[in-house]
Image (cartoon, helix red, strand yellow):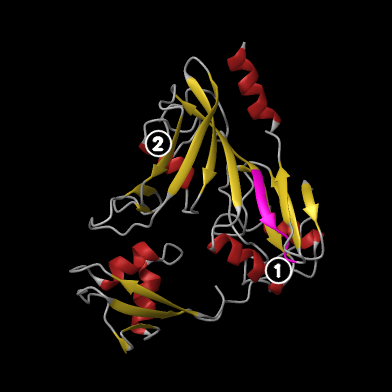
Amino acid sequence: MSNNSQTLQLDAVGQRLDKVLTEQLPDLSRTQIQRLLKEEQILVNGRPAKANLKLEGGEQVTITLPEPEETELVPEAIPLDIRYEDEDMLVINKPACMVVHPAVGHSSGTLVNAILAHCPDLPGIGGEKRPGIVHRLDKETSGLIVIAKNELALRHLQAQFKDRTVGKQYLALVDGQVQPPTALIDAPIGRDPRQRKKMAVIPFGSSAHSRPAQTQYDTVTGYDDYTLLRCELFTGRTHQIRVHLAYIGFPIVGDKVYGRRKPSIPLKRHFLHAAVLQVKRPSDNEELTLHAELPLELEAILKQLAE
């Protein structure tokens, strides 16, 4: 995390401050939040507060994050499938099972390690451990991801994601024959209060916090027991497509977290691929539309289903 402050407006009446912040700040553990409260790095309406503060609603909370610890990021000469590159940005077709950035249990072999070997000048862009990373793809999700190569480009690209002007289309194979064949899923998503590592559809006004989430899906091909969908994201919540499709009863094939306990098709990954990315180039604001074909292992599944 880079040294910065952020402000939240809380409307969780009657709930503990540390519990609400844990839901709203998934990158921080409850222990980290409690430590920040003790160190008076979290202010409620401009004043230090205790972790067990019961909220009345409407509080303004300011969180100041500390300087990041020095971490040595090691460049690794891992082959990259580059679909576009200029002085400001890279668009990479990420393979499945590659983690985007180093984390606990994944200190090497990540996309960041590979990018640092390709672009040695990237360290320090956008914060420690995630140099140039503008958005994320889950470990098992393949497809297009954009990387900024300098601070100005990073801010330009981040603004597009924040303003929801980036076009993102995914291909997903799901269990079942989807009905209706096309629809907008408009269901808020938040951290699952029972399992913090999972996300869930959580109605507004419930005890847990959630944020608006919209996914448009259209049927590409119907099979006997499966449907290939094209999904377009209008928001960018964690695990959004996976959560939404499971919520309407059509989980993604191979999804070990939100799908069937026993996969209906033997896959070492889930069948979700970021196929299309539309983004404006930082240098001249020209819109780029980039495509990434399905990986061979996913194409093979579709061929089997079509037989």
Judge from the rendering whether residue 17 lies leftward or rightward of residue 148; answer left or right.
left
Mark seen at residue 70: none
Give the vertical position of 56 relative to 160 (above or below). Answer: below
Mark nearer the N terminus (1 vs 2): 1
- Please give the range of residues in magenta: 276-282
| Depicted 151 relative to depicted 193: above or below | below
Q: x%, y% of residue 108? A: 67, 56
Q: Work out whether residue 194 can be spotted.
A: yes
Residue depicted at x 80% and y 67%: 120
Q: Is residue 266 magenta?
A: no
Dot 2: element: helix
In the rendered structure, find residue 246 and report the number of the disc placed on it.
Answer: 2
Residue pictured at 42% horizontal, 51% vertical: 213
Position of the N terminus, as image quadrant, is bottom right
Judging by the rendered image, the residue that carries numbered circle 1 is: 153
Residue 74 position by quadrant: bottom right
Instruction: Identify the element where label 1 is drawn.
Output: helix
Residue positioned 44% across, 48% down in the render:
214
Name the amino acid type tagged 1: Ala
Q: State if disc 2 and disc 1 touch (CB < 8 Å).
A: no
Q: Compared to 90, does 155 lie above or below?
A: below
- Where residue 249 sits in the image (x, y, percent)? 37, 31
